[in-house]
Image: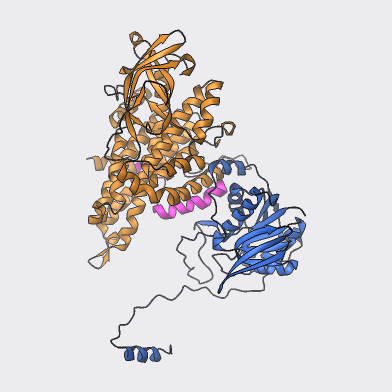
Chain colours: A blue, B orange
Amino acid sequence: MSGRVLVGVKRVIDYAVKIRVKPDNSCVVTDGVKHSMNPFCEIAVEEAVKMKEKKLIKEVVVVSCGPQQAMETIRTALAMGADRGIHVEVTGKDYENLGPLQVSKIMAALAKKEDALLVILGKQAIDDDCNQTGQMTAALLDWPQGTFASELSMEGDKIKVVREIDGGLETIKINTPAVITADLRLNTPRYATLPNIMKAKKKKIANMKPADLGVDITSRLEVLRVDEPAQREAGVKVETVDDLIARLKEAGRI
Amino acid sequence: MAATLVRIFSKSCRQICRPWGACQAGWRSRSTHTATETSTDQGVVSFPPLQTFSEEESMMREAVKKYAQERIAPLVSKMDENSAMDQEVLTSLFEQGLMGIEIDPEYNGTGSTFFSSILVIEELAKVDPSVAVLCDIQNTLINTLFSNLGTAAQKEHYLSRLSTDMVGSFCLSEAESGSDAFSLKTRAEKHKDYYIINGSKMWISNAEHAGVFLVMANVDPSAGYKGITCFIVDRDTEGLEIGKKENKLGLRSSSTCPLNFDNVKVPEKNILGQIGHGYKYAIGMLNEGRIGIAAQMLGLAQGCFDNTIPYTRQRKQFGQRIFDFQGMQHQIAHVATQIEAGRLLTYNAARLKEAGRPFIKEACMAKYFTAEVASLTTSKCIEWMGGVGFTKDYPIEKYYRDCKIGTIYEGTTNIQLSTMAKFIDKEYDH
């Protein structure tokens, strides 16, 4: 086994930005808006770097799919401690239509090419909230998956994953190679220190296109319309419980 | 009167007139494309705007911004109240590599550029100007002096400590010599292969935490300022006494102490640079430090402004946001313009210095102007916030107290203006 971990990172609109929809309702405004690494992807990178520091794995390779700006995100991951990067170039209309299915095909192809021991991804991206890429990647590779991981530990050639589920916590043990998706409480991502930012400049980022991996990125989905959530309406005060029930019935809520 | 002058000045900075918020975001996303490339494939030279950063500079800025917001912001109020810098802040500043920005990685430094230091100081000052000044003194004064003048042995011994865990202090001013720095009285008497230093220093920043002091003392008072020499004095040297820190109006968590030298013995090998050249080093370093202070004042003004505008957009009186009253809008736009002008002066002075071109007049202009802008901004921000601006529950009053020192330290405003006038005079010589 190569001892190599592949980490996927996505460049998304920064979580603190107020999102606005374009006037033609086609999509969200991205021009001139602050972008940063998806918070769950940061957690994924941190986990991989921690594993390397504990000498459980040998190399952390970080991957991002997108236009030129995706390089920024890869550099940030390199500054956090990843060893090298792969930029899969997807631009224009292709990028607008890039979704979990296409990305998981790319990740699967790269996992095979890089002979990866683990693929670690964030559980979901904060822009589309799909929560699909990790699961699809595992399916395409026919690898076991440990999703919503809040704790990871290597036990020989198996991995113990504590998963956050609705009812509480579930612990599973899966074979490697495997796909893991990181949940919020897995770790606290480190800051890229200034010396590490400087070191990251020397690390290599390979450039390739989806076609180079033999991946077809045509989308099966078409976005018809994007709307803002309905404005919050004013509330209504009622005097008695009977009143409340009547009003709720009126509104068709019960 | 002053307002008219300032308006004329701001009219001459016609570069960027869009609302600050949109402008900033725009430049940030564009800067990663353009970097600092100045010629295209056709060999045509293009001139990127001053607010263009290399990828490295952008990443540093983002990293420091995040760090300052998460690790320093929660401690600011307490540190100001207690007039004490939290140890956690000092430790994390070193951890993040912020105390050795220009130091070579050979000595555990970050190995970055002067402009990166300026951006770091600006970002820190947005959150706490006291932390920014600590970082500024370390980077633009102490580290630069050691890097430029140190012997191999001195660099080996001190630079790696300065980048990892040791704070430095620069000791020039005395009770009787501030602006008239070269009339300093601290004396260094030569004996065989060592010197005995006697005297006292005043207003020494970082003194509470410093492990090393760069002391300007005169070895030969009969030679006047040409006897001033720079000595490296370790904290634990016998006879060095660090006095009680001053109880200040602003920049309270930055320690400012008097120092006493009572027959302090310093070996000859602890002289930094050449004997009698101390005055040159002091002037040289202060010229650069000036840009650092400009960055601090800039960050202070911006941080104060950024904390105030959201309030004006939220607060309603007479049925509308106070931001929407024309009187408010005009004042806000005026202040935003001043900050932008100060930013361009500061960035330009920094780029000039990096390019090895003359920068002293521009550095003076940057420091003088940004200190004035910080005063104006903080004063106006308190007014815009109304009653709450006057309370300690909001961070605005701290910025107001912190900014005053900008017109005083590292060269008073009057000194800056006189220096500029000397340059202007020379410009018309032919």
Quadrant showing the C terminus of chain B: top left
Front residue of A60 and B293? A60
Residue B111 visible: yes
Q: Position of residue B155 (x, y in %)?
A: 53, 25
Q: Is residue B198 left or right of residue B155?
A: left
Residue drawn 77% across the image and 62% down it = A214
Q: Which residue is found at the position 53% from the left and 32% from the top?
A: B103
- In the image, residue A101 lies in the stretch drawn in magenta: no
Asked if the magenta segment contains residue B29, the reply would be yes
Q: Quadrant of the N terminus of chain B?
A: top left
Q: Left or right: A161 with respect to B120?
A: right
On the image, the x and y values in percent for residue B32 come to 55, 49
Task: Return the residue nearer the eye: B183 or B308.
Answer: B183
Count the labels in the image. 0
Left or right, residue B112 beside residue A144: left
- Residue B234 location (% of width, % of height): 44, 24
In the displayed structure, A47 sits above or below A226; it is: above
Q: Which residues are magenta?
A: B11-40
Q: Nearer the viewer, residue B327 or A201?
A: A201
Query: In the rendered image, which quarter is residue B258 located in?
Result: top left
Task: State whether residue B280 is above or below residue B254.
Answer: above
Question: Percent from the top left, x then y, of residue B349?
Answer: 43, 34
Q: Is residue A28 left or right of residue B282?
A: right
Query: Does residue A98 appear anywhere in the picture?
Result: no
The vertical placement of B77 against A95, above or below, is above
